[in-house]
Amino acid sequence: MRVALFITCFNDTLFPETGRATVEVLERLGVEVDFPYAQTCCGQMHFNTGYQREAIPLVRRFVEVFDGYEAIVAPSGSCVSMVRELYPMAADFAGDGRLAEKVEELGPRVFELSEFLVKKLGVTDVGAYYPHRVTYHPTCHSMRMLKVGDAPLELLRNVRGIDLVELSEAEECCGFGGTFAIKNADTSAAMLSDKIRRVLDTEAEICTAGDNSCLMHIGGGLGRLRTGVETVHLAQILASKAEEG
Amino acid sequence: MKTKPSDAFSPGPTPTFEESAKESLSDSQLRRNLGKATQTIRRKRAVAVDEMPDWEGLREAGRALKERVMRHLDEYLLRLEESVTRAGGKVHWARDAEEANRIISGIAKDNGAEEVVKVKSIATDETKLNEHLEKEGIKAFETDLAELIIQLAGETSSHILVPAIHKNRAEIRELFMERLGAKDLSDSPSDLTEVARLYLREKFLAARVGISGANFAVAETGTVCVVESEGNGRMCTTLPPVLVTLMGIEKVIPAWRDFEVFMQLLPRSSTAERMNPYTSFWTGVSEGDGPREFHLVLMDNGRTDVLADEIGRQTLNCIRCSACLNVCPVYERTGGHAYNSVYPGPIGAILTPQLVGIGDPGPDSLPYASSLCGACYQVCPVKINIPEVLVHLRGKVTRHKQDRGGPRQKLDPENIAMQTAARVFSDPQLYERAQRLARVGQWPFARGGSIGRLPGRLAGWTAVRDLKPIPQQTFREWWKRNRGSV
């Protein structure tokens, strides 16, 4: 199977290691990965902040760039939910019936990494080895918009050497919310402090998730407090092997 | 604590959510009261909902019924008027809050009432009815325990269902001792309610006019319904000889049998009960039983504007259960006062700006009072897609600023940043150049492997969070080098 990697502008620029890990995992499972070079940003930040007119050209660009691929995979529940769940609203906003048809057709072909592995490929053991105590935070968009369910946990449970511990009140938002963390920085920080408390309660070394945006937020707080707890994207845990672990 | 009404429904500009939240967030007592209360009620709700095998079907039925009401609102309202009139009630139409208040004070005056008793009603909070009545020389007594508490404290409601959720027992005990002259009072719930009960009994018996809101009104039969827990509503709607109900026009439901759906959805979503203690239904007036006169005031006050908005109109489906407040991570931490509206929480964040219109900094800030986590949508018993409406309203607010704001708006750093980003993202070459520039540009901030302080609005991030510096190689650079195919 040949898939297009939708790296997301966020991972491309800030977390390239997550992109490399995604490629590694997919290729290990025999998937041929293509990287459409013309991709930039899905437009989520603009759309969700209210700059919808500005987001429309980015929606059009995405639809064009990823036209024709059987499957499009991204290591981000949030960006995938933008494409799959909000592009129809964007097309309506643009008042463009042609675009609406295109995004309708595109949506079902776009996958978040864990759901692609578990639901599309039917794989729950990717042959990873990661000898660390890890807790998993289900990100809001992957859980509530994409409904990836237990797919990330199924993958984690099959990682050799891992000590997976449950996070309490896991389904509560970490407080990131894109520009929310800037516009309502105080409220966001209050939400973050509770998330951090729960992560620390698990005594995990690593907090993982399917979105680097949420992890950047949680990790930013954990780092500032010098907790010694790190955040690592799910793809990187899945890409880890014995000789590296 | 907010004591004077400077909310979105009062004249003049309203503080923004961000400004007000700052205050609430630093109130440790409030944080504890709210955290405890919302966590308890949302756990209970989950249990009450989980035992329903057809919950998703019920939600869909509730949504579909409400959607039908909104599509044919004009017909259902006329049918309601006809049914209520046939049953001996009188229907009044109010374009806005002022007209509604005038109608209600007129009825009270016609009946020589100097005091009225009230059932908990957010519609009357929306119109600021109590203030209006006071100006007209009529004293309104709130009879719902929590409404009484905040009325005595001179505060405003902070929750749709539990208006005094921000107060704990110890605070209520002090208030009752001070305002009701209660002596030797403990802070046990039964002692506290006993004091309120003794005080309110006299009011119920003396009042000539009772005022209520409505949870539902049935177009087919003219039956009005109030759902409550304490029985004070039953008293207000049966004891005084005159009953006035103020109702937003969106509260009409088509037929009696629709209660099958709503009476399963509402109690479980709001109080986590299978059935609430008191559900009162009345149809016009009945000889020798209950009030002699019944007035139903049907109020628009911005609702038809909401109806005209294709995405926004689902907001009118709300049955005021407050499940969205109890699961909202923002509400849990800021409380209701930060929203500066009688409608707080996620539903308030979409209802308030639509009712009052875009252009006031306070209500304009409400659609941004959310991380778009979607917990509200997941629990809404009538499936209002609150995140979708939030995003839609953010668009309206942004476009209003861009199109009607002055030059200051155009020079707003956020607007400039967003315009620049949009241009950069529209061209891969520009995008790659920007990635390289950011890597170079970050050097004044990146020290010792992390960024601890950023300028301008971004300082909000680094106030409590570090930021990792941008790595030396982007993914696409790695791909180009290692895979070679472009």
Image (cartoon, coloured by chain):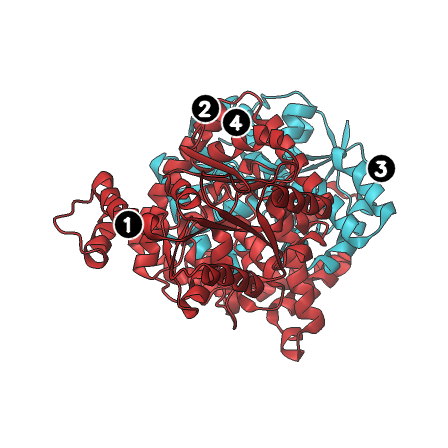
Depth-wise, is mark 2 or mark 1 nearer the camera? 1
> Disc 3 and disc 4: Cα gap in Å?
31 Å
Decide if residue B202 is on the left or right side of residue A193: left
Q: Do labels 2 and 3 share a chain?
A: yes
> Disc 2 and disc 1: Cα gap in Å?
71 Å
Q: Which residue is at the far right?
A: A98
- Kind of residue at badge 3: Gly
Looking at the image, which residue is at 69% across and 23% down?
A121
Q: Colour of chain B?
A: red
Q: Position of residue B6 (x, y in %)?
A: 45, 67
Q: Position of residue B251 (x, y in %)?
A: 59, 45
> Disc 4 and disc 1: Cα gap in Å?
60 Å
Q: Position of residue B379 (x, y in %)?
A: 53, 36
Q: Do labels 2 and 1 share a chain?
A: no
Q: Mark 3 points at which residue?
A: A68
Front residue of A151/B186: it is B186
> Disc 1 and disc 3: Cα gap in Å?
76 Å
Crowding at mark 4 (Cα within 10 Å: few <14, some 14-19, many 20+): many
Q: Colour of chain A?
A: cyan
Q: Which residue is at the far left?
A: B184
Q: Which circle marks residue B202 in the picture?
A: 1
> Disc 2 and disc 3: Cα gap in Å?
40 Å
Residue B432 falls in which quadrant of the image? Answer: bottom right
Q: Do the residues labelled 1 and 3 touch (CB within 8 Å)?
A: no
Question: Which of the two labelled residues, at mark 3 and mark 4, occupies the earlier sequence position?
Answer: 3
Depth-wise, is mark 4 or mark 1 nearer the camera? 1
Crowding at mark 2 (Cα within 10 Å: few <14, some 14-19, many 20+): some
Depth-wise, is mark 2 or mark 3 nearer the camera? 3
**Would you say residue B287 is visible in this rendering?**
yes
Q: Where is residue B59 in the image (x, y as percent from the top left)?
A: 60, 32
